[in-house]
């Protein structure tokens, strides 16, 4: 079994690029793969590996400036859910494109998973899913509003166009692991919304801690690794992935005429050029050749 750790921390890094070599070295030494994003505003990522390797990587992250109180969420995977290790420098660790948003200044009130059901069941609360449309499609909380955004950058514009719908209601927000809500709740507070809440630890913590027979979650939770989705108890779900657009697919989606393994699906058929699809077909060919040799293709 591999340990999967999802983490983020908003903190000030004066020179985030200088932190990359050390983190990469620790992860490589411990057999850890996945993605770590570094920016001046902090760190975000999901990594997987053997227990000792994850412990070493987390220790290295906690030693970074302002990261001593890092909180992360763990789950298990029977196979390695990542093909390689990426330690990248970014402008934002989660891209909202709002330079005045600062989660270190103020965020919404954290609501523990055990108190979430009562909050979102209240008549004076509106519940907003801050994730992208393809994530919401496969699962969300009962009664939650889907902004139908294709990117987190779209959320501010959606809010401006729809804020009149919510009157004087309290606003409860949620996302996969909590990081998007750090920015979206700060944004709403800056917009003058007086009472803003968000699910502490995100959907992943809720699915880990709240029993299925008490849950208000419906469907699967999309995750950005080879597991594709998880359900209650963080058990891997039944969904596959379109390796062209990286969106989730049900088995029935693979029988549609738009689907070509590794090349296209019904969601992305019109999003790529013929040159892109030629490149995707070559990648799929290399994946098949690697499998025939008993090797893993690190795509």
Image (tube, helix red, strand yellow):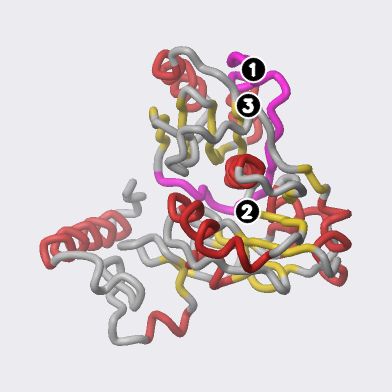
Q: Which residue range is magenta in the image?
A: 60-83
Residue at image mark 2: 175
* Quarter of the image where one finds residue 213: bottom right
- How far apart are the two marked residues, 3 and 2, measured between alpha carbons? 22 Å
Residue at image mark 1: 66
**Residue 11: image location, x then y, percent:** 59, 22
Q: Residues within 10 Å of mark 1 (few under 14, many from 20)?
A: some
**Residue 95: image location, x then y, percent:** 45, 42
Q: Taking 103 as reference, is 169 above or below it?
A: below
Q: Taking 268 as reference, is 280 above or below it?
A: above
Q: Is residue 180 left or right of residue 241?
A: right
**Residue 132: image location, x then y, percent:** 50, 60
Instruction: Determine which of the numbered discs, if any, sits on residue 262 in the image.
Output: none
Mark 1 or mark 3: name the one nearer the start of the chain: 3
Judge whether residue 252 can be spotted in this image: yes
* Quarter of the image where one finds residue 147: bottom right
Residue at image mark 3: 58
Question: Is label 3 in a helix, a strand or a loop?
Answer: helix
């Amino acid at each position: 079994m591999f340990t999967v750790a999802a983490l983020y921390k908003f903190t000030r890094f004066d020179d985030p690029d200088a932190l990359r070599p050390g983190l990469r070295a620790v992860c490589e030494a411990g057999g850890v793969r996945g993605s770590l994003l570094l920016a001046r505003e902090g760190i975000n990522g999901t990594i997987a590996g053997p227990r000792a390797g994850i412990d070493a990587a987390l220790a290295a992250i906690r030693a970074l400036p302002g990261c001593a109180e890092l909180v992360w969420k763990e789950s298990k995977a029977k196979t390695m859910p990542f093909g390689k290790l990426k330690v990248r420098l970014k402008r934002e660790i989660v891209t909202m494109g709002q330079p005045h948003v600062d989660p270190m200044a103020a965020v919404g009130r954290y609501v523990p998973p055990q108190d979430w059901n009562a909050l979102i069941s209240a008549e004076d609360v509106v519940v907003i899913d801050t994730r992208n449309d393809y994530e919401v499609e496969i699962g969300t909380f009962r009664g939650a509003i889907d902004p139908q955004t294709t990117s987190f950058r779209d959320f501010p514009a959606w809010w401006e166009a729809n804020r009149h719908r919510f009157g004087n209601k309290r606003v409860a927000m949620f996302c996969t692991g909590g990081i998007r809500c750090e920015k979206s709740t700060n944004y709403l507070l800056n917009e003058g919304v007086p009472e803003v809440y968000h699910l502490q630890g995100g959907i992943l913590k809720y699915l880990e801690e709240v029993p299925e027979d008490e849950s208000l979650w419906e469907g699967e939770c999309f995750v950005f690794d080879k597991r594709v989705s998880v359900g209650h108890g963080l058990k891997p779900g039944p969904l596959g992935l379109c390796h062209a657009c990286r969106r989730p697919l049900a088995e029935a989606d693979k029988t549609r005429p738009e689907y070509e393994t590794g090349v296209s699906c019904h969601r992305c058929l019109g999003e790529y050029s013929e040159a892109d699809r030629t490149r995707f077909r070559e990648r799929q060919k290399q994946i098949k050749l690697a499998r025939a040799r008993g090797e893993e293709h690190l795509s």
